[in-house]
C-alpha cells in the first residue's frame, strides 16, 4: 500500500469517507486533490478491502439491517398504522424512510399482514386467542407464538402463528432459515415427535417430490434425504475446485499483500489476465503472472 499511496493520502481518504456517500465522488476529489488518475475501482478496493471502510451509499441506504428487520417484526403489532410505525422506526434508527417504503418492506419482504388502513371503517375487535393456542386446518397444525393487537387479522399469519412442527423443531435446535422447512419423516402430519421431524432445504424437497421418494417409512425417507444432501455437497465441492483452477492467486504465496495486485489491486506488469465483471466490482481472472510463487500445499 505504501508504494502506491502515501500516509497523507491514506489519512485524507479516511477523513473523506465520513462525509462522502459515493465512490465516484471520492475518487474525483482524490484525483483533483493529489493530481492523480486513479480509477473508481482502485479507490473502492483500497477503501473496502484494505481500510475496511464501507461508504453509506445511496444503494445501501435502501437496505435494512438484520437489527432493523427484527425491530419491525417485534413492533409491527404494537403500531396502529404504518404512519405510526414509520415515525417510530425513523426515530429509533435515524433513518428517513417513507410510509410506503415501510409498508412494502413489512408486507412484501417480511410477510407481515394486517395493518389497518385509513380507509377501513367499522372493524370490530375480535377476541384474542392466548399464546400457545393450537388450531388445525385441512393441511396443517398451527400454534400461536406472538400476541397480536390487530384482532382483525385473519388466517394464521407469521410471525404470530407458526406450523407446530416448526415450533417444536426450533425449540430444540434453534431458528431455521427462510429457505428451509421441517418435514415429517414418516409422512404422518399428526406425529410431532422430535425424532420424526427433520429440517431440509426447500430445493431438496423438490428433488424428493420429483422422484417420488417420500415414504411412510422413517428410515427410507431419511436415507433419500441424505442422498440429496450428499449430492448437493459434492456438486458444491466440484464447483469450488473449478473456481480454484480459474484463479492463479488462490495458490500463490504472495496472495495476501505480497504483490502489487493483492496489495492495492493494481494490475501486475507482464501478467496474462482477463478482466471480468462481478456483481459490484471489476476484477481479473489471472492465468500467468511474473510474481506468482506456488504455495507449499500447491
Image (tube, helix red, strand yellow):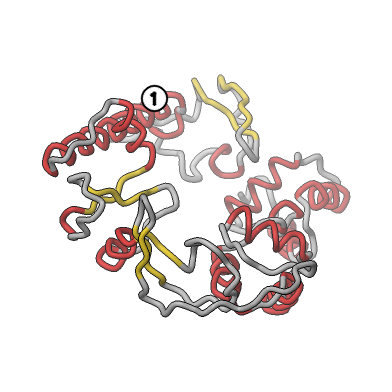
What residue does disc 1 label?
Answer: 242
Instruction: Give me the residue at 74% from left, 61% from top.
Output: 17
Residue 4 coordinates in the image, percent (x, y): 67, 45
Residue 277 coordinates in the image, percent (x, y): 63, 30
Name the element at disc 1: helix
Looking at the image, residue 59 lies above or below residue 254: below
Q: In the picture provided, is 260 more to the left or to the right than 245?
A: right
Q: In the picture provided, is 211 more to the left or to the right than 1?
A: left
Looking at the image, residue 133 lies above or below residue 6: below
Residue 196 coordinates in the image, percent (x, y): 18, 53
Residue farthest along the right direction in this orientation? 32
User: In the rendered image, which quarter is residue 262 located in?
Assistant: top right
Residue 167 coordinates in the image, percent (x, y): 33, 64
Looking at the image, residue 161 lies above or below residue 263: below
Instruction: Give me the residue at 78% from left, 52% from top.
Output: 22
Instruction: Give me the residue at 86% from left, 53% from top.
Output: 33
The answer to which of 181 and 153 lies nearer the viewer is 153
The answer to which of 151 and 147 lies nearer the viewer is 151
The answer to which of 1 and 277 lies nearer the viewer is 277
Amino acid at each position: 500500500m505504501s508504494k502506491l499511496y502515501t500516509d497523507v493520502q491514506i489519512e485524507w481518504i479516511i477523513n473523506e469517507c465520513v462525509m462522502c456517500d459515493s465512490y465516484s465522488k471520492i475518487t474525483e476529489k482524490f484525483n483533483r486533490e493529489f493530481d492523480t488518475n486513479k480509477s473508481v475501482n482502485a479507490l473502492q478496493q483500497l477503501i473496502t478491502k484494505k481500510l475496511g471502510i464501507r461508504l453509506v451509499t445511496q444503494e445501501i441506504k435502501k437496505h435494512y439491517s438484520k437489527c432493523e428487520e427484527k425491530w419491525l417484526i417485534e413492533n409491527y403489532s404494537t403500531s396502529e398504522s404504518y404512519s405510526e410505525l414509520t415515525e417510530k422506526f425513523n426515530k429509533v434508527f435515524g433513518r428517513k424512510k417513507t410510509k410506503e417504503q415501510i409498508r412494502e418492506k413489512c408486507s412484501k419482504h417480511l410477510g407481515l399482514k394486517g395493518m389497518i388502513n385509513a380507509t377501513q371503517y367499522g372493524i370490530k375487535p375480535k377476541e384474542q386467542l392466548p399464546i400457545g393456542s393450537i388450531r388445525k386446518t385441512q393441511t396443517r397444525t398451527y400454534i400461536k407464538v406472538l400476541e397480536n393487537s390487530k384482532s382483525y387479522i385473519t388466517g394464521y399469519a407469521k410471525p404470530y402463528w407458526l406450523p407446530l412442527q416448526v415450533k417444536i423443531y426450533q425449540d430444540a435446535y434453534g431458528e431455521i432459515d427462510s429457505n428451509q422447512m421441517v418435514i415429517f419423516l414418516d409422512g404422518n402430519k399428526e406425529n410431532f415427535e422430535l425424532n420424526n421431524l427433520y429440517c431440509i432445504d426447500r430445493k431438496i424437497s423438490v428433488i424428493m417430490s420429483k422422484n417420488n421418494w417420500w415414504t411412510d417409512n422413517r428410515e427410507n425417507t431419511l436415507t433419500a434425504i441424505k442422498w440429496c444432501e450428499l449430492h448437493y455437497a459434492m456438486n458444491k465441492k466440484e464447483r469450488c475446485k473449478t473456481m480454484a483452477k480459474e484463479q492463479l492467486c488462490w495458490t500463490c504465496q504472495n496472495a495476501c499483500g505480497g504483490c502489487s495486485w493483492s496489495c492495492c489491486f493494481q494490475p501486475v506488469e507482464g501478467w496474462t489476465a482477463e478482466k471480468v465483471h462481478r456483481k459490484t466490482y471489476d476484477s481479473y481472472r489471472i492465468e500467468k503472472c511474473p510474481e506468482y510463487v506456488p504455495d507449499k500445499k500447491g
